[in-house]
Image (cartoon, coloured by chain):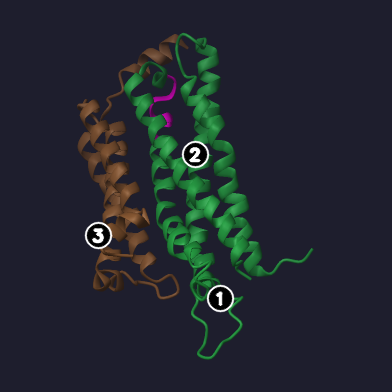
Chain colours: A brown, B green
Amino acid sequence: MANKITVSDNKPNGPVAAALLAGGIGSGLFGLIVLLSEVSESFGTALNWYNPVGPLSGKSILGVGIFFIAWLVLHSMWKDKEVNFDGISTASLVLLAIGLLGTFPPVWHLLGGG
Amino acid sequence: MEMTGREIWTTIHGMVFGFIFLLGFSGALYAVYAMRPEWLTAEGMKRTINLTKTFVWGLALSAWGAVITGTYIVYPWYRARPPEGTTDLTTFPRSFLLADESIAGWHEFGMEWKEHVAFLAPIAATVVAFIVSYYGPTLARKVGERRAVMIFFIVSFAAAAVAGLFGAFITKAAPVR
């Protein structure tokens, strides 16, 4: 068992940083897309990709798509690498916070949307 | 004791997928928190991590299940526009709420927040599940990574909790029938 842990210790942190940053990018851009769609009526209308769901269809497909594409790209770049985890972790948490703010209706109202 | 098809889907969305996620969160968070070399033996760590991997992937799948069924099955019933001249709006929850100023806030604030913030839950939970699976027992020795995992997990829970709470309130004010 001790051997197993030692072997795992050698794993590069790149894939973890890639997942974390992709989560941040997906969340942050989703928040910005939501915010923009609430502030700009034309942008909101353009996101109506599936009528029964309305603009939420475009927002959700874009947000989730961005997350998985960002993950794929970052993973392929960092899969064998050691990266600056602290910096990436901080950036991911900031992006996650942007996602939370962008999905909060009072923030839209502050910017004239909603 | 009868349920319509819409009520069954609403139940699957909230009381199956959503409930599993919200109920399982605290156990999974504690499992990640308790992954400390000084607290667990190597054998204990191995058993804990195997269970935790299954647990967090199950929670991530539940979160995806909740947002997909919520957005693409239940939400269209919620937001459907009533035909011209309809006076009984009880089967059109969004219009029903907006027609009465005293309850319109459930849509204008509650539903608007819920339908968007909910998407952060499965994204963050998937990141958590991947990191726990990737590192396995080694996560116990990765202080920064474990902290980031816990923050992502807490945000995931908070987003799901907002969605679940407003889902319950809105269903009480204007159920999908």
Name the residue that disc number 1 marks. Answer: B92
For the residues labelled 3 and 2, the Cα–Cα distance comes to 37 Å
Q: Alpha-carbon neighbours of circle 3 within 10 Å: few (<14), some, or many (≥20)?
A: few
Cβ atoms under marks 1 and 2 closer than 8 Å? no
Q: Nearer the viewer, mark 3 or mark 2?
A: 3
Determine the secondary structure under disc 3: loop
How crowded is the residue under tag 1: few (<14 C-alpha within 10 Å), some, or many (20+)? many
- Residue A1 image point, x, y percent: 47, 12
Q: Residue furthest bottom?
A: B85
Quarter of the figure that contains the N terminus of chain B = bottom right
Residue at horizontal 31%, vertical 53%? Answer: A102
Q: CA distance from mark 1 to mark 3?
A: 30 Å
User: Which region is colored magenta?
Assistant: B129-137
Res A8 seen here: yes
Query: Mark 3 — residue?
Result: A111
Question: Residue A25 in the image: x percent, y percent?
Answer: 26, 46
Residue B131 in view here: no
- Does the magenta portion include B130? yes
- Residue ID for mark 2: B57
A39 and B150: which is toward the camera: A39
To the question of a shared chain for discs 1 and 3, the answer is no
